[in-house]
């Protein structure tokens, strides 16, 4: 089965495939983006009705994951209409019920109000997200868990040893759903009295990142370009716990990478992060931050030193099941189901 996947070259999508290529699924490569460097898949040309019309004979199922952030509801209706006109079934994986890059949910809500009802099949990652979709649109998505993020060879490697207990907070590019400043202050106070514990804060090297670092002059804030994949795995494996500073959101690939590498996650109560895998949870949403709960979670991580690493064998077996689940959905739709 030939799948027009939007995108194709993304770690989540790559790891939907059977690890030995035995699922009978071929995902088309991402088309070149005019004016963009090689390898950049966004903004996706596959979302253009003209692309669908020109390539309808090249794929059996259209599967949308990411990349529609800048599309208007009208443009998305045109995409759906083009797929219907060419009788190509449409699958949507609902990764985000709330877009982490948008302070105002209205734009993403409007997009989902077009896409969710139009999809022939829906997939999401957790039962909580499925319940929210059911309540909002009356649709029943398949729940298929997030696959591993770190490559299987790295998954099998032992964790490196280090001194002390390192809590990490990565502010990334300070996207809209993060509130890392107040979280950093609480975590810094929480580790201050714990022997051998320290907080490491990272942020991307841009103007907002440098301003963020300047606002925390008394803390260990490291400003640098975005990590490569290998550097990110080294960073996460060097932490004992990673605090997610989100005040809204849905699911997290970062959390999955921490599971792959054996780094405990301290996750906020918003979204469905805690359903993805074992983690410590603290109160944090758009109503505010529960400082006492965050302090307790960090200190629990220090006291317990939880080992929630997802093993390479288990992740490989899970990936086979994930591939089977997708192949079953695609085959049903391609057969007119």
Image: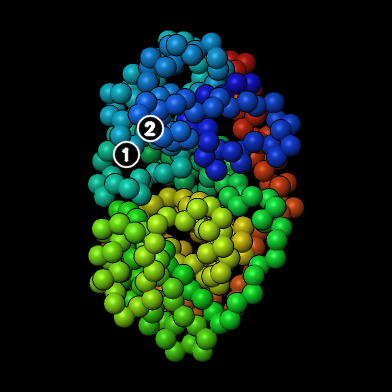
Q: At numbered mark 1, what does the secondary structure look like: helix, strand or loop?
A: helix
Residue 187: where, in percent of width, then height? 40, 76
Residue 62 seen in render: yes
Q: Around disc 2, counting alpha carbons within 10 Å, would you say few (fewer than 14), some (14 to 19), or many (20 or more)?
A: few
Residue 278 seen in render: no
Q: In the depicted view, which residue is nearer to us: 93 or 178?
A: 178
Quadrant into which the N terminus falls: top right
Q: CA distance from mark 2 to mark 1?
A: 25 Å
In this view, 242 is above or below 74:
below
The residue that appears at 30% across and 23% down in the rendered structure is 75
Q: Which residue is mark 2?
A: 36
In this view, 163 is above or below 62:
below
Residue 329: where, in percent of width, then height? 60, 28
| Tag shown at residue 108 | 1
Comparing labels 2 and 1, the label whose residue is closer to the camera: 2
Image quadrant assignment for residue 138? top left
Q: Earlier in the sequence, mark 2 or mark 1?
A: 2
The residue that appears at 38% across and 76% down in the rendered structure is 220
Q: In the depicted view, which residue is nearer to us: 113 or 254?
A: 254
Residue 70: where, in percent of width, then height? 30, 34
In this view, 301 is above or below 271:
below
The residue that appears at 39% across and 44% down in the rendered structure is 97
Quadrant into which the C terminus falls: top right
In this view, 55 is above or below 70:
above
Image quadrant assignment for residue 207? bottom left
In the image, taking residue 224 as reference, residue 164 lies left or right, namely right
Q: In the depicted view, which residue is nearer to us: 248 or 172?
A: 172
Q: Are the residues at dot 2 and dot 1 in contact (C-beta closer than 8 Å)?
A: no
Q: Around disc 1, counting alpha carbons within 10 Å, would you say few (fewer than 14), some (14 to 19), or many (20 or more)?
A: many
Image quadrant assignment for residue 118? top left
Q: At numbered mark 2, what does the secondary structure look like: helix, strand or loop?
A: loop
The residue that appears at 58% across and 65% down in the rendered structure is 237
């Amino acid at each position: 089965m030939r799948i027009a996947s939007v995108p194709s070259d993304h770690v989540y999508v790559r790891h939907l495939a059977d690890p030995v290529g035995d699922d009978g699924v071929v995902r088309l490569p991402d088309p070149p983006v005019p004016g963009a460097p090689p390898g950049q898949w966004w903004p996706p040309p596959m979302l253009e009705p003209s692309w669908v019309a020109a390539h309808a004979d090249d794929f059996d199922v259209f599967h949308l994951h990411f990349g529609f952030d800048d599309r208007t509801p009208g443009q998305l209706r045109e995409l759906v209409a083009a797929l219907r006109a060419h009788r190509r079934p449409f699958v949507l994986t609902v990764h985000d019920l709330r877009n982490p890059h948008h302070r105002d949910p209205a734009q993403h809500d409007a997009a989902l109000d077009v896409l969710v009802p139009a999809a022939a099949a829906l997939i999401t990652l957790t039962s909580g997200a499925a319940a929210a979709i059911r309540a909002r649109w009356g649709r029943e998505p398949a729940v298929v868990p997030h696959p591993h993020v770190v490559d299987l060879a790295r998954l099998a490697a032992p964790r490196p040893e280090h001194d002390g207990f390192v809590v990490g907070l990565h502010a990334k590019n300070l996207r809209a759903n993060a509130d890392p400043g107040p979280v950093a202050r609480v975590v810094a106070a929480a580790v201050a009295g714990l022997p051998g514990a320290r907080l490491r804060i990272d942020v991307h090297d841009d103007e907002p990142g440098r301003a963020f670092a300047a606002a925390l002059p008394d803390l260990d804030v490291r400003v640098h370009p975005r990590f490569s994949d290998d550097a990110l795995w080294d960073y996460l494996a060097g932490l004992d716990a990673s605090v997610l500073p989100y005040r809204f959101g849905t699911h997290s690939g970062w959390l999955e990478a921490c599971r792959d590498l054996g780094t405990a996650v301290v996750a906020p109560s918003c979204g469905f992060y805690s359903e993805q895998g074992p983690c410590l949870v603290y109160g944090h949403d758009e109503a505010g931050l529960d400082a006492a709960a965050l302090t307790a979670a960090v200190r629990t991580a220090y006291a317990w030193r939880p080992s929630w690493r997802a093993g390479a064998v288990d992740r490989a077996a899970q990936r086979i099941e994930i591939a089977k689940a997708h192949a079953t959905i695609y085959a049903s739709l391609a057969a007119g189901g």
